[in-house]
Amino acid sequence: MAAAVIVETKGGVSDFQGGHEPQVNGRTLHGQTDLWKCRVQQGNAASFRNLDSALADSNLDSDLKQQIITHLSDLKAEFIRYFLDIDDKREAWKFIRNPFQCEVADVADEVQEEFLELKFNSTAKEDFKDMDLETFWVKYLPVYPLISHQALRILTMFGSTYLCETAFSTLVAIKTKYRNRLNVEGDLRCPLLSIRPRIQDLVSKKQCQMSH
């Protein structure tokens, strides 16, 4: 049953990594693990759907409680170790979320001049209202390369971490011990690509092989 908790918390971390506001997600995950631990100590498994279903009308025994609490404590400690300076970076990353609500003192010295040009660019301000963060910073990369590069470096860092975790989970599901010689390159491409294959279009271009 403890394995069910590990699977569900791993999925939760992947969801956080898939977002693009790391400083918010970091604090959310810290609070989330504390909440989960508090509930488990009270015998409440509602935070873990699979475990809650498996228990049905049973209660969490003390050994299982301790296993879950230990896992959650290790998860939080590992997250803090991995993102050691995340709180220190929170202010420095503020301009990524909205450069038009920041002051020049909030950004690094080497990009301050570009930042001021961007902040008072009325066209960019209108674009920011209509675009997601990634699209906005990519569009203005040729115009404001220094500050846009800083923003995209942070945004893609967390997106790529999420993709790595997704690829690893997919690989484990496909390449089992019964298929350990399988070349998974082609099989991995389909579930990981955001582009969906047009199966009907592909099939319509093939000629059926009629039996003789």
Image (cartoon, rainbow, N blue to C red):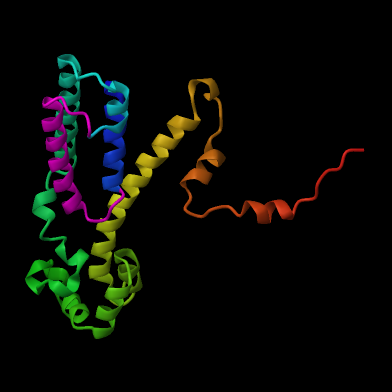
Q: Which stretch appears magenta?
A: 18-46
Question: Could you say where residue 114 lies in the image, as x and y percent from the top left?
Answer: 20, 76
Residue lying furthest right: 212
Q: Quadrant of the C terminus?
A: top right
Left or right, 143 with respect to 63, comes to right
The quadrant where residue 148 appears: bottom left
- The number of numbered discs placed on residues in the rendered structure image is 0
Q: Quadrant of the N terminus?
A: top left
Front in this rendered view, residue 114 or 63:
63
Establish if 151 lies above or below 196. below
The quadrant where residue 71 appears: top left
Question: Could you say where residue 65 lies in the image, as x and y percent from the top left?
Answer: 17, 21
Residue ID at (26%, 40%): 13
Establish if 128 lies above or below 173. below
Front in this rendered view, residue 39 or 116:
39
Left or right, 95 with respect to 8, comes to left
Front in this rendered view, residue 157 or 169:
169
The quadrant where residue 106 appears: bottom left
What main secondary structure does the magenta stretch of the protein show? helix
Question: Could you say where residue 107 lies in the image, as x and y percent from the top left?
Answer: 12, 67
Question: Could you say where residue 209 lies in the image, as x and y percent from the top left?
Answer: 83, 43
Left or right, 18 with respect to 75, comes to right
Establish if 187 lies above or below 101. above
Q: Look at the image and say whether residue 107 sits in the magenta stretch.
A: no
Q: Look at the image and say whether residue 23 sits in the magenta stretch.
A: yes
Residue ID at (26%, 34%): 9
Residue ID at (28%, 57%): 155
Establish if 203 lies above or below 45. below
